[in-house]
Amino acid sequence: MMDQSGDFRTIVETHQEKVRNTCFRFVKNAEDAEDVAQEVFLQVFESQSHFRGEAELSTWIYRIAVNKSLDFIRRKKRKKRFAQLTSLFGVGEKDEVLDIPVPENPQKELEGKERKQILDWAVNTLAENQKAAITLSKYEEFSNKEIADIMEMSVSAVEALIHRAKKNLHKQLYKYYEKHI
Amino acid sequence: MNNKEKIEREIGKTLDQFEQAEKLPPNPYFYTRVQQLIDDKQKKHSVFSTFMKPALLTGLVAFNLVTAIWFFTESEQTYDRQELIQVLASDLKLNTEQNNILSLD
């Protein structure tokens, strides 16, 4: 598959944009997304012997991208929890953690940027598999079949996940707007 | 418009942000960075294979040799059978006046 460096370069150039953007949807930060995306292709390079062609190459690559992104988020959450714990004991730097966005002026019409923050926050409250399914579906516009291949589940399982994700998103946003408008 | 309708309107506008999602600009240096990561990793692996593995192996073998030599030189004193049993018995607290169960007489 990738015994020539030219092949690997072609693979990177073909998929890098979508991989970078997929990672960005999960990690929400451009620099972090670049780092995670680079790790994705590093793993693609190192794991080439494990790829037996059971799935499309692109499916395999995006699966690695989703897994790496979710790993990154988990690591970040652990660091955050540790930082919060140490700050309780007056150890380490005090980081202001703003989890729930608060509109500057509840009377004023929300701007797109603020709405995006609210949506990001709501998506972040979802369970991992719901978050992954809705992110791939809504942001990256993968079809349900493609998502099923990436997440290694059936199409009906993906449809159920997306349905639950939309329901939970609506619930979270309802609670949020009930409080803030 | 009642409150519920207001909330639903806000939710709708917020969910519309899925379609407005920003994309990362293209990165012309991306492949170069990936190749650099690969090269760095291969260099580290090569240093480990070339120096550390043989050094570790040599160290282990040397340690085993030293231990074996020390063990056999310390074991100069050998017990005869009766003495050995008495040593074991005292370790296991079996050799008392009332209960010398290991006496072979």
Image (cartoon, coloured by chain):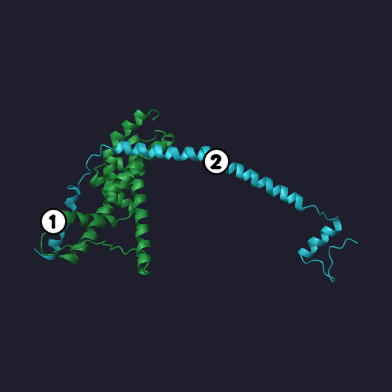
Chain colours: A green, B cyan
Residues tagged 2 and 1 counted as in contact (Cβ below 8 A): no
Pointers 2 and 1 within a single chain: no
Determine which residue is flagged by label 1. Answer: A111
Amino acid tagged 1: Glu
Q: Residues within 10 Å of mark 2 (few under 14, many from 20)?
A: few
Quadrant of the drawing holding the N terminus of chain B: bottom left
Picture layout, residue B87 above or below residue B27: below
Q: Is residue A100 left or right of residue A70?
A: left
Q: Residue at x 15, y 61 (%)?
A: B7
Q: Residue at x 22, y 42 (%)?
A: B25
Q: Residue at x 28, y 37 (%)?
A: B29
Can residue B35 be seen? yes
Q: Is residue A172 left or right of residue B82?
A: left
Foreground pick, A152 / A24:
A24
Question: Does dot 2 land on a helix, a strand or a loop?
Answer: helix
Tag in front: 2 or 1: 2
Q: Position of residue A174 (x, y in %)?
A: 20, 61
Can residue A56 be seen? no
Q: Residues within 10 Å of mark 1 (few under 14, many from 20)?
A: few
Q: Position of residue A49 (x, y in %)?
A: 44, 34
Foreground pick, A67 / A44:
A44
Amino acid tagged 2: Lys
Determine which residue is flagged by label 2. Answer: B53
Chain at numbered mark 1:
A
Q: Residue furthest bottom?
A: B98
Picture layout, residue A154 above or below residue B76: above
Quadrant of the drawing holding the C terminus of chain B: bottom right
Foreground pick, A138 / B51:
B51
